[in-house]
Image: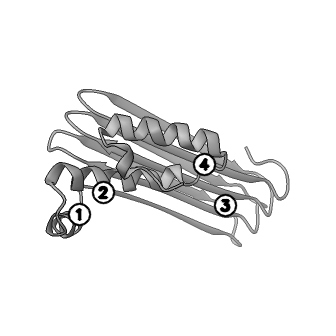
Amino acid sequence: MLDGTGAYLILNGLSVLAGTQHVDHHTTIDHAQPHCESHEYFNGVFDGASRGVFNGRIIVRPGAQRTDSKQTNNNLLLSDGARADSQPQLEIYADDVKCTHGSTVGPLDQTALFYLRSRGLGLAAARGLLTYGFGAEILDRVAIPGTRERLDHLVRTRLGVGDEIGRAA
């Protein structure tokens, strides 16, 4: 609960699943006071028969004027058996707010894949680069360098892409 005037929250999440793995993210951000700000970004990468569920709820209480809240859930499906269910929600009981929410679920961009392949990358390398880039959007939000580098390594390992696709120093 954001219960102090001017409170600020950043909530980031990244799931990289394969096989029959399943993840549920249920979040509630409650804006109880005026001039609060929240930014929630969750990305999911799903392969095999994996499944992800995102249910994010943002509440803006009466009197919580001048609230600024953003909620985004983007999901990448790498196989026909993968599934992502997304339900971003806004409950707004104040009239002077700036709130947005959105969700995407879909496969890799075939045009981007074609472009990388036409530049000499093999199918696996092109898919790996695009998938890594999708996850790196969240990794770039991690402010602590050592933590960001460790997470970057874990994501590259999980995706099966090498250091050559990793970020520049």
What residue is at 27 percent from the left and 49 percent from the top?
A: 128
**Residue 124 percent across, percent down from the top left:** 18, 48
Mark 3 or mark 1, which is nearer the start of the sequence?
3
- Residue labelled with disc 4: 142
Amino acid bearing label 2: Leu
**Nearer to the camera, 72 or 128:** 128
Give the residue drawn at x 60%, y 48%: 142
In whole angstroms, how far apart are the C-alphas of marks 2 and 3? 40 Å
Q: Nearer the viewer, residue 147 or 73?
A: 147
Say whether residue 107 is visible: no
The residue to which callout 2 is attached is 130
Q: CB atoms at circles 4 and 3 under 8 Å apart?
A: no
Residue matched to label 1: 109
What's under tag 1, amino acid-wise? Asp
Marks 1,2: beta carbons within 8 A: yes
Location of mark 3 (residue): 93
